[in-house]
Image (cartoon, rainbow, N blue to C red):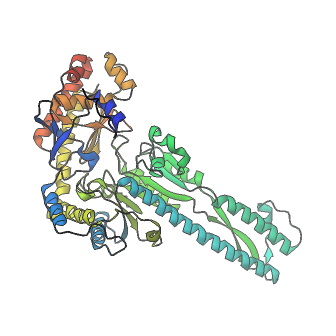
Amino acid sequence: MAPEAQELVDGTLHQNISGIGLDPTYVRAEGNSLWAAAHDGSETEIADFVCGYGSLLLGHNNPEIVAYATEVLNARTPIHSQFSRRPEANKVTEVLNRIARREFGTADTYFGVFANTGAEAVEAAVKHAELDRGMRVLALVAQVTEHTEQARAAVASGAATVDAATLTRLGITSRGDGAGDLEALLAEVEAHNGRALSKAPVFFTLEGGFHGKLAASIQLTHNPSFRTPFTSLATNARFLPVNSAAAVRPAFEAARATVLDPVVTDGTVEIAEVAAPVFGAFFVEPVQGEGGIVPLAPEFAKEIAAVSAEFDCPVVVDEIQSGSGRTGAFFAASQLGLQGDYITLAKSIAGGVAKLSVLLVRESRYRPEFELLHSSTFAKDGFSTLIAQKTLEIMERDGGEVYRRAAERGARLLDVLESVRADFPDVVKDVRGRGLLLGLELHDQSGSASPNVAGAQAGGVFGYLVSGFLLHRHAVRVLPTSSAPNTLRLQPSVDLTDAQIERLDAGLREVCAALRTADEATLLGFLGARTF
């Protein structure tokens, strides 16, 4: 017998998930369904509540998008034409601006920066925010330099003297020599400003937040198991408790810094304290995805917006999972009244057919210099941007029927989850989310009378065990969120049917009943009777 071929992609991952039945091979996809290859050569239809981690709001292989993609390719449309005009990308950005103006009730303009994945859009946001902050630092340094020379000229000409109180406040003993006192003062100013402006920028983000796994984005992701191995690459991130409005202002106050600026006023050299540009950005998700499907409270969002504006810190609203229509509006943040200075979009923005992400930067923050400093070979390619155009056309059609459908399907699904929680309060801890971004949190099972269930909880794989059960017993595909593994994520498409919701309901009720009684035969029986 020939030796089994070595698996060269995700082999360790597949070995781990095979033990709990989460390693089928899917051979077909349509609407809200996947078909798994069964051992007997047949195919089993699976109700997909994962849907590409939220990338498939319009369903698997949406027929209108697939037909258009075929048309685009058959037309020999230029896909790669770097360093040329890209009207397709511009059109996408125009449509996104129109939607933003409608949903936020604003006249603001956003510029677009394109990439391929959500994590890349976050990386671009970090880079742009730092470019903006750095340019503000340079402008402030130039201002202080100009004022320094003005002070020297004024003292040298006898038109100004150094304020004695200012010397005392800075701990400088007067020499009785105007020029000498000024130079001592300016030396202290230079030293203070050097310390203030050499500090790494501060990026605020939230406990439970997830913004990607690339070099900068991983440092904004709260989960320590993802972040800690790469702290040597760290963005200076500070994590605030989610939905704690009282924590926002103290965090800014603790991180603030000032620059000393010598100014001549009425013949006296004084020192003005100017806020130093130390804040990079504040990253938030309107609904935390990987953190357990946690919606931001409106009052918390309001506090973030108000305090960030006061401290001149841009707000980056990460709509990668929550945006593109999933919560019943195109921008989930519009349901909170939270308008970002930056907005990141990905996943469903190109219909789940093309890979595309967009960073939107508000005009008041936008730095045109960024266009020459940041690029990507596949960003804003002709194919992906045309598919995004078609996707946005579908979403905006009929006065936003897709958004209404997401809200209606989400409400129907939420009713079922709430009913399960009401009947099994000892098993289901919480149900939360918005639209078609919902989570069902199960109680900790460390005290289960089932050794295997308790062991799965201790090993951090309890949610995956439940997912395997639902997959094989009820042909329902769910997965837990990565940073809150007792929370099952439910991110289906608008093609979700009542029959699929009923199938999920039946599966959840069976697993909850088995967990309630620690019925191992039911909970684990699927492991020995897998058909796919």
Give the image location of residue 313, x and y in percent.
Answer: 50, 60
State the image coordinates of residue 413 (x, y, percent, origin top left). Answer: 19, 41
* Residue 519 showing in the rendered view: no
Q: Quadrant of residue 419?
A: top left
Between residue 197 and residue 452, name the one nearer to us. Answer: 452
Residue 50's place in the image compared with 77, above or below, is above
Residue nearest the viewer, comparing 481 with 37: 37
Residue closer to the observer: 56 or 324: 56
Q: Residue furthest right?
A: 176
Q: Is residue 82 above or below residue 320?
A: below
Horizontal and vertical percent for residue 222?
45, 43
The residue at 32%/34% (across/down) is: 6
Whether residue 238 is visible: yes
Quadrant in the rendering for residue 458: top left
Q: Name the side, left or right, on which 156 lies relative to 327.
A: right
> In the visual, does 67 lie left or right of 289?
left
Q: Is residue 475 left or right of residue 53?
A: left
Q: How many discs appear? A: 0
Residue at 50 percent across and 40 percent down: it is 229
Residue 233: x and y, percent? 53, 49
Q: Quadrant of the N terminus?
A: top left
Q: Quadrant of residue 333?
A: bottom left
Q: Residue at x 25, y 52 (%)?
A: 326
Quadrant location, the C terminus: top left
